[in-house]
Image (cartoon, rainbow, N blue to C red):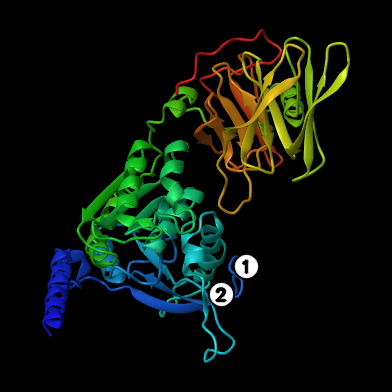
Amino acid sequence: MHIVRTFAFVFCISINTLFAQAPTENYPVDPASEEQVGVPKGEVLKFTFEHSKFFPGTWREYWVYVPAQYKPDKPACVYINQDGIQWKAPVVFDNLIHKGEMPVTIGVFVMHGKVKAANASEANDRFNRSFEYDGLGDAYARFILEEILPQVEKQKTSDGRVIHLSKNGNDRAIGGSSSGAVCAFTAAWERPDAFTRVYSAIGTYVGLRGADRYHTLVRKYEPKPIRIFLQDGANDLNIYAGDWWMANQTMLRALTFAGYEVQHQWGEGGHNGKHGTALFPEAMRFLWKDWPKPVKAGNSQNQMLSAILIPGQDWELTSEEKKEPNKKQKITKNLSKSDSIVAHNGNVYVTISDGPEKSGSISLITRNGKKVLVDKGLLSVGGIALSPDQTLLYATESASHWVWAYQIQPDGKLTHKQKYGWLHVRDDDDNAGARGVTCDREGRIYVASRMGIQVLDQTGRVNAILPTPAGAASRITFGGENFDTIYATAGEKVYRRKLNVKGANSRDTPNKPDAPKL
């Protein structure tokens, strides 16, 4: 009996301690979250959608908020939210639009999809929430842009107003809570041309489906024109996938480092929507401030980006250039043959690949015309390049995420083969899709991949990522009068960009770059 009473006493103390540690979440109520006398009320319409090509077989509900001030003769700004209507959003929008603190905005509140069971009494529906929200890649952004928003524009208000939505990314915001927040960030990250403003509450930037990689990618990518509001609490989840509280702080540090316009509010709350709801009006004021002035990309503290990029210099589509056609043809020819390279001493290295994920090889053709097989067994070799001192040869594999490095011997043969460079892989790919590769005179290694151009330092680490206007890249080479312009193929287009570097022309006298920083 004494033991039972002791256990009961300890149990009560533990429970009381637990509840004592859980903070009481009381937040000031923003007046914009409450209905105000004299403020025109918008209308909320409800629909369903079940014909998605991106998420086949799914059924979902979505709601459309149309403000009273909306007039069909002018496309409205758009706010998209995952998990349906949250944050008392219709009331907040009524008040902020009335006071001119945000533009006339149509809200689209989308639930995650589910594949309905054939017999609900015998089986559960398949819930698509984590797949749609936590996964990286552009599928959800395309789902919204190509399926949901066109459906919204087919609808009418109860008084017969047709719905016209702005196609300008500067007029679009997207937000959500938890996995819905990651989904919102992913949509903007993948399509900054379509979404420039993000509200992220208790964001799931952890290891569920790869979002834990964002804080690294944000630091390496050339900054994008996105404005972000972050919210989280110190008592958020800490489970098998990671620590939400620490992950959100890490995201803030990454975004700040990378030059993004970001505002945050930290609290003591847990994994719920209380603080996010209280902050929603403040978030909307921040995200829409100065509209229609466009959101601009910031300046990153990434040293490699600062070293290689020239402010104001962006990608240009060479097919639109009418000048120097012969020079352009020469560049295109070089791009299509980036799997062969001629060294300063006259040796030629040539790659041969039998197709995707099949054996690839590298052959040496010496100055006297002798052909020697110098390596084999590569997984669909993509491209090769020489270091600026021409003592190393780099080879990419389009069927892996590696850049191989070899030491070149006096006779031209290759030794000390090593998986040297580590490349990033897109979430929905099995490999980096690396093909063309080239170097600058400082020893940096530029690799054309599905993510764009990944730039590695001399030790094989990706320091920076430069997406082309088409995102991916397949072939790259340096050219131009001073060999300071990088050319990249993306699909059937060739882009160029002037950089603050000079390419390592393999035909020139080799140069020794500074020693790498460890």
Residue found 47% across the figure and 55% down from its top: 187
Query: Residue 100, located in which quarter of the rendered image?
Result: bottom left
What percent of the width, then of the height, locates residue 353? 80, 37
Q: Is residue 158 left or right of residue 8?
A: right
Q: Which mark is residue 25?
A: none
Residue 228 vs 408, above or below: the answer is below
Q: Residues within 10 Å of mark 1 (few under 14, many from 20)?
A: few
What percent of the width, then of the height, locates residue 63? 42, 74
What percent of the width, then of the height, locates residue 423? 57, 38
- The amino acid on which the numbered mark 2 sits, given as a three-letter code, is Thr
Q: Which residue is mark 2?
A: 58
- The amino acid on which the numbered mark 1 sits, given as a three-letter code, is Lys
Q: Residues within 10 Å of mark 2 (few under 14, many from 20)?
A: many
Q: Which residue is mark 1?
A: 53
Of residue 159 and residue 180, the one placed in the foreground of this image is 180
Q: From mark 1 to mark 2, how far is it between C-alphas?
A: 9 Å
Of residue 57 and residue 491, the one placed in the foreground of this image is 57
Q: Which one is earlier in the sequence, the residue at label 1 or at label 2?
A: 1
Of residue 37 and residue 218, the one placed in the foreground of this image is 218
Residue 389 vs 36, above or below: the answer is above
Q: Is residue 164 left or right of residue 277?
A: right
Q: Secondary structure at mark 2?
A: loop
Q: Secondary structure at mark 1?
A: loop
Please tell me whether mark 1 or mark 2 is closer to you in this view. 2
What percent of the width, then of the height, locates residue 46? 43, 79
Q: How many marks?
A: 2
- Which corner quadrant holds the C terminus? top left
Of residue 474 and residue 345, the one placed in the foreground of this image is 345
Residue found 30% across the figure and 48% down from its top: 249
Mark 1–mark 2 CB contact (< 8 Å): no
- Which corner quadrant holds the N terminus? bottom left
Q: Is residue 459 visible?
A: yes
